[in-house]
Amino acid sequence: MPVGQRGGFPTHWTVRGEGDREVLFIHCSLAHQGAWKAVQERLAPWLRMTAFDIPGHGRSGDWDGQGGQDDYQGVTVAMAADLIDGQADLVGHSFGATAALRLAIEQPKKVRSLTMIEPVFFAIVRGLAAPGIEEHHRKYRAVMAALDRGEPALAARHFLENWGLGAWRELPETQRSYATARIGQLRDIEPEIYRDRAGLTGTLGGLDMPVLILDGSRSPAIMSLVCTELEHRIPGAVRHRIDGAGHMLPITHPGPAAARIAEFLQIGPIRE
């Protein structure tokens, strides 16, 4: 498990797989690179897969806006870019998918293909009128209100339950503590995912690498809206919905997720 400076940030990463084709995985908020293990096990015969811990997660460095840097997503993108030697396929989930999208837009020569699993790029549906959007914002406001009151455990509970991690009381204490310690970092990703401070929305039509978008049939309604907007705006994007899956589908449905990625990359067959 290598550790070193990547993108100017203390980074921990792992490498799995027996193949020659390079793939880089970027995990979601409040998780770590190990969230990809079950997906990667199914892809291992064909790919060489790198996954890293984003800032303040896993065994990468703590996040405190080092050096006056306030672009959390930008630092994540820099770490990812520095882990690519030449060119790689990108696979990202949730926040990690937004970072993968930004890397594909800003440094397309490094990206052979892009797979986004439920990217939380809420800025793309800003201004749309749909019940799922207001429901999401109502739940998000509850998370932020708990943080404002100095109740990070309650904020983490709202967040994890909203995104399908299960009832708070049934989660292991280690997972609850991990989420509670990091829940405040949601404020650091807000400018990019809610307001598109990086300016990605207007550049989506210029993506010319193959793009796969995955979502779950049981995910919050806003995710279907986000994925539909991305599908419509990215030329040639392929969309697949995984039946019975929610937002955490790389963990809950690793077989179908790996199978769709394998079909997209034209490798396999994959055990679902």
Image (tube, rainbow, N blue to C red):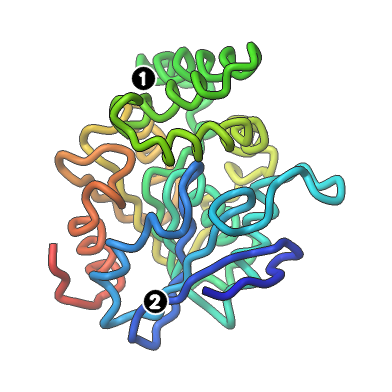
Label 1 Cα neighbours within 10 Å, binned few <14 / some 14-19 / many ≥20: some
Up-down: is 32 above or below 136? below
Neighbourhood count class around disc 2 (C-alpha, 10 Å): few under 14, some 14–19, many 20 upward = some
Q: Amino acid at mark 1?
A: Gly
**Nearest to N terminus: mark 1 or mark 2:** 2
Q: Position of residue 212 (x, y in %)?
A: 35, 57
Residue 118 position, x and y percent, is 38, 43
Q: Is residue 233 visible?
A: yes
- Percent across and percent down for residue 214 are 31, 49
Calculate the distance from the C-alpha at mark 1 to the C-alpha at mark 2.
38 Å
Q: Report the amino acid beneath label 2.
A: Arg
Q: Quadrant of residue 211?
A: bottom left
Residue 27 lies left or right of residue 166; in this view the side is right
What is the x, y in percent for residue 93? Answer: 42, 50
Which of discs 1 and 2 lies nearer the camera? The answer is 2
Task: Tell me if 175 is positioned left or right of 256 in this view.
Answer: right
Residue where numbered disc 1 is placed: 132
- Tell me what residue is drawn at x 20 percent, y 46 percent: 242
From the image, tell me which residue sits under label 2. Answer: 16
Taking depth in this image into account, of 151 and 79 the one nearest to the observer is 151
Residue 236 visible in this rendered orientation of the protein: no
Q: Is residue 104 above or below residue 195?
A: below
Please name the residue shown 56% across and 32% down the image: 183
State the residue at coordinates (25%, 40%): 216
